[in-house]
Amino acid sequence: MDSITISAPDDWHLHFRDGDLLSETVAATARCFKRAIVMPNLQPPVTDAALAMAYRERILQASPTPDFGPLMTLYLTQQTTTQIIDEVDLAYIPAAKLYPAGATTNSQQGVASIEHLYPVFERMSERGMLLLIHGEVTDADVDIFDREKKFIDDYLVPLKQRFPALKTVFEHITTTDAVKFVNGSDASVAATITPQHLLLNRNDLLVGGIRPHNYCLPVLKRNSHQTSLREAVRSGSNKFFLGTDSAPHLQHLKENDCGCAGCYSAWGALELYTQVFDDLDSLDKLEGFASHYGADFYGLPRNTQKITLERSNWVMPELIELPNGDKIVPFFAGQELSWKLNNS
Ligand code: NCD
Ligand code: ZN
């Protein structure tokens, strides 16, 4: 197959940032995705409905097309109240994001005690709002490669027992344990998977030198986990859908003795997912993953427009230069991709 036409896809997890960066990030996503779930980990974070709506306006202003729909999320903190949940739901904000405090970029104001938020989860469940979870513990004595599994055992299992109806997205899963947890859960649980976790494993981070542009959180795992993620998408299960976790950081902040976590994949994420499904001889499963299952899980209509990808080689630029001179190294920089979005 040299070309594939699918319903227009959506990105169910990404980071647009704010200010000057929006003209870059929103355009890069709107080139192929119709909607995106926009993460709220700004500085300061998006902690109420008014902040989310104002942020949405800034994204719309920066969008090169009126055809793109940002879907906003609430950043849960220790101070989030049920009243904030009511206001957010009334503003048609579909989801709230749980960052364990200290787990990842801009998560300092995240949640230190998950049990403390149980009244908030109760209200979200009643209102049909989605809970999006960065599923890693932050205990200093837990090995970074074990943090996702420990989060499942210590927090996710009890959470789902307590709130069986709460729609929960286990974001950017990275382990066999997470795939098993999601597969073993009922229809209230789903997961997003990033292109980097499908394409790479920890060797791509550490063998031959540290590669800061492959560093993201949750960190890349050993190849057996990568294989489980690839199996999950190849299975065609509607519990797994596209969430790029595209997360730009300036070049000098990644190429640094304490480099930031996050891969800026928006320039090629859709093409890279296509490459993965092609490698797995499963191009017929791409459309469900990229364009159907996320919308279904969120209870939103599927997109009616179509897009076409063609088998064609091109090289990801080494560098993206912003109008103000700042530089970002995109994910897969300088490497060849074998599928291309047909923009005509
Ligand atoms: C994300 C970011 O940079 O905001 N970084 C990352 O490594 N994925 C935050 C996140 O999703 O964990
Ligand atoms: Zn993210």
Image: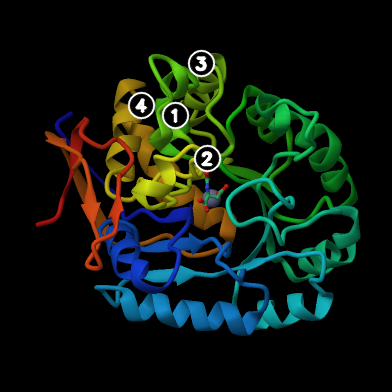
Q: CA distance from mark 3 to mark 1?
A: 10 Å
Q: CA distance from mark 1 to mark 4?
A: 14 Å
Q: Nearer the viewer, mark 4 or mark 3?
A: 3
Find residue 148 and report its horizontal and vertical position in percent.
69, 33
Give the position of the C terminus as an image quadrant.
Answer: bottom left
In the figure, is residue 193 to the left or right of 78?
Answer: left
Q: Earlier in the sequence, mark 2 or mark 3?
A: 3
Q: Earlier in the sequence, mark 3 or mark 1?
A: 1
Relative height, residue 219 to residue 319 (above, below): above
Q: Nearer the viewer, mark 1 or mark 4?
A: 1
Q: Which amino acid type is marked by label 4?
A: Ser
Secondary structure beneath disc 2? loop
Which mark identifies residue 223?
3
Q: Which amino acid type is marked by label 3?
A: Asn
Q: Earlier in the sequence, mark 4 or mark 3?
A: 3
Which mark identifies residue 198?
1
Q: Which residue is painted at 25% across and 37% down in the image?
A: 333
- Asked whether mark 4 and ligand 2 are closer than 8 Å, the reply comes as no
Q: CA distance from mark 2 to mark 4?
A: 39 Å
Q: Which amino acid type is marked by label 1?
A: Leu
